[in-house]
Image (cartoon, rainbow, N blue to C red):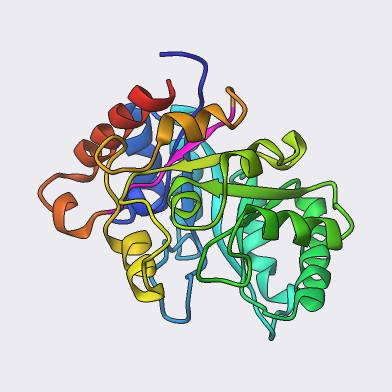
Amino acid sequence: MGTRTYSLSYLTSHRCTPASVLAVAAQTGYDCVGLRLWPNAPGGPRQFIDAPGALSEALAVQRDTGVEVLDLELIRINEDFDVYTWDRLFEAGAAVNARAILVAGDDADASRLAHNYARLCEAMRPYGMTADLEFMPWTAVPDAQAALRVVHAAGNPANAGILVDALHVARSHTSLDDLRALPRSLLHYAQICDAQAGTHFSTEQMIHTARCERLQPGEGTIDLPALFAALPAELPVSVEVVNHVREVHFPPHAWAAQCLAASRLITG
């Protein structure tokens, strides 16, 4: 099976509670999970770990299975960003020993975005987590080069990171050379899925695919072998395959197992 670490992402397992996704991961051969403990937009879906007993239940499954938490979602840096908003997320991350928090850059003011990203890294440092900035073509950080500019402008914090999502590489102006140019110290994990590649999609189409209609690796036109060959060979892989139409025909563990098997064929 190789030496890769595989993580069951939130989007692949969005039907699960934090405790049940840890159990599903253990059952299907994943090493880690991703949890969305903060919605990606006001009122958006998330997994509740602050409900009575939810954290202790998740910690019990962790102890029993050895499955780790790779990343938490999601911090969005916009023009109204306040670093103190996220204290509960930091505390939850520390409780489950999460390694990273996924960060989206949504402020068109580049200087303010970099300043707030630096503040976020500083606030997260005592909790032992990295702040992994995910470039997405419809955001203020549309490609890999833009993400690297933010990190540099922020002063290259020690816990900075850049998250590479195969879908966003394929739908942005990000080249394989851009990926190769990313410093190894900034790469903590990468996300895999498939889709139709290209830069001609509307914002609405890109968001719909990202949140609702990804394909399993090998089913689309993203050159996944070349993409992952451009990244470090031992980089952990977060399996992020959400497909609302198809997944309802499978229980969460069966869908997770299919997605992992397809991902291993590409990256294992």
Task: Judge from the rendering whether residue 90 lies leftward or rightward of residue 64; answer left or right.
Answer: right
Horizontal and vertical percent position of residue 223: 40, 37
Residue displayed at 46% across by 45% down: 166
**Camera-nearest residue between 112 and 181:** 181
Q: Tell me if residue 36 can be seen.
A: yes
Residue displayed at 28% across by 34% down: 218
Task: Judge from the rendering whether residue 28 lies leftward or rightward of residue 3; answer left or right.
Answer: left
Q: For the view shown, which residue lies furthest in the bottom direction?
A: 80
Horizontal and vertical percent position of residue 82: 73, 79
Horizontal and vertical percent position of residue 42: 47, 81
**Camera-nearest residue between 128 and 158:** 158
Horizontal and vertical percent position of residue 62: 49, 36
Q: Residue 190, relative to residue 235: is it above or below?
A: below
Q: Residue 172, relative to residue 258: is it above or below?
A: below
Q: Residue 5, relative to residue 11: is it above or below?
A: above
**Camera-nearest residue between 249 and 62:** 249
Q: Which residues are magenta?
A: 235-242
Q: Tell me if residue 67 can be seen.
A: no
